[in-house]
Amino acid sequence: MATESVRTTQEQMQNGLSTEKIRMMIDACGSGNTALIEQLAAENPLFIRQQDFETGLSPLMAAAKTGNLELSKRLLDRGAPWNAVDRDGNCAGNHAMSGEHWELVNYLVEWGTRAELVLGEMQRCQQQAGISIIPQAPTKDPGYQSSTKSDYLKHQLRYSKDGNALLDGDDDAVMMEWERPIMKAHASIMMQAPGKRVMNVGFGMGIIDSILQEHNPALHIIIEAHPDVYQKMLKDKWDQKPNVKIFHGRWQDVIPQLAKEKVEVDAIFYDTYGEHAFDMEDFHFAMSDILSKPLGVYSFFNGLAPDNLFFHGVACQVIKLQLGKLGFDSEFLQCQIEVNDNKVWDGVRRKYWHGRDVYYLPRITWNQEYIGRKTKANSNEEHVDTDMEENSTKRQRR
């Protein structure tokens, strides 16, 4: 999820914005001094968008700290960036959460969700026009670099000596052993009884697939695109395990073929690496063709915006709305985790989890009302087709 970094003093001076007046605007928003806010905004509307160079605090953050909902609404309407972060990495939503101003938090989540959906549509158009949608990192700091890696399948992967990580050519972690408790939780919500048909996309270290095997699935489909991982699977004789069917290739190619063959599964797990958010959105369209109705369960590794809890909440809401259009209900179950030991990340270039002790596990199921409407619609179509066939037969007999 894109964030707005602190604007430089040089940029502010180029726009004729004095540091003193920027701080006056921020202080006015913190105290709710409407007269001064309007005076400064009339002088230059850009004051609403600025941040203090030293602290990174913005007018919207100052208003959010005090829980001033009405002022926050006005600032947003006039161009205040909802996703700007201060020097500590906190946005307006984080400040509102710290103050337990939950009405404002909910409003900021809704605003951010709408903004992300609009941005997503714009980027879709850019992508279709052949324009790159992967932003350039402002620094060489790995934390600012995109996690999307279009060349991932060309990377030479390696498993760490202790077996606790799978690393790509940049020493970024594809998967790590600390995820095992999370994967057990995912498996438990998908495999509530033996004999289920399950599909996992992204084998990696085989953590969740090993756990799924413990649930005695009737069919266990594994889709893995990377050749190094696939060779490791064969070496470990995964192709000989009970009811396992391995597809070596991209899910974009495999799932349409499965749908064409009328393959159906009761549970699906998605945990790919290096893909863009659009790939995940496209996956949701594809997997809806093979997830059984009405009791099929879908889940995914929830590493969305992992370094900021507020942005994580916005990202989850975006996914929820996108899945809702496909006929799914989404809930995010809280799981306690511990990844606070920095030694876990030894040899890894950048973290993909940042010390939070709560993991929000997605559980996605079919909306029963949606299924009912679709079933009724299909029934009506079949009825119409039957009537047309009968009328055609009558006309032929005549």
Image (tube, rainbow, N blue to C red):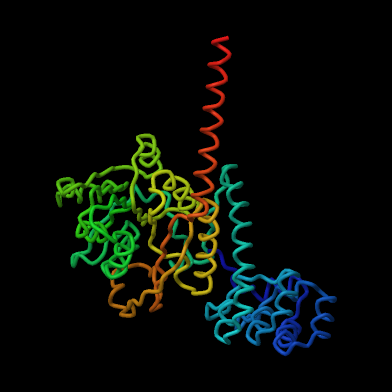
Tell which of 37 and 386 is nearer to you: 386
Q: Is residue 290 left or right of residue 130?
A: left
As drawn, 39 above or below 125: below
Q: Quadrant of the C terminus?
A: top right
The x and y percentages for residue 12 are: 71, 74
Residue located at (49% from left, 73% from top):
308
The x and y percentages for residue 61 are: 64, 80
State how many labels appear.
Answer: 0
Tell which of 225 and 109 is nearer to you: 109
As drawn, 239 above or below 186: above
Image quadrant where residue 41 sits = bottom right
Tell which of 98 and 140 is nearer to you: 98
Q: In the displayed orientation, state which residue is furthest to the top.
A: 398
Residue located at (55% from left, 11% from top):
396
Q: In the displayed orientation, state which residue is furthest to the bottom.
A: 31
Image quadrant where residue 24 sits = bottom right
Residue located at (55% from left, 49% from top):
132
The x and y percentages for residue 232 are: 20, 51
The x and y percentages for residue 360 are: 42, 70
Residue located at (84% from left, 81% from top):
39
As drawn, 113 above or below 35: above
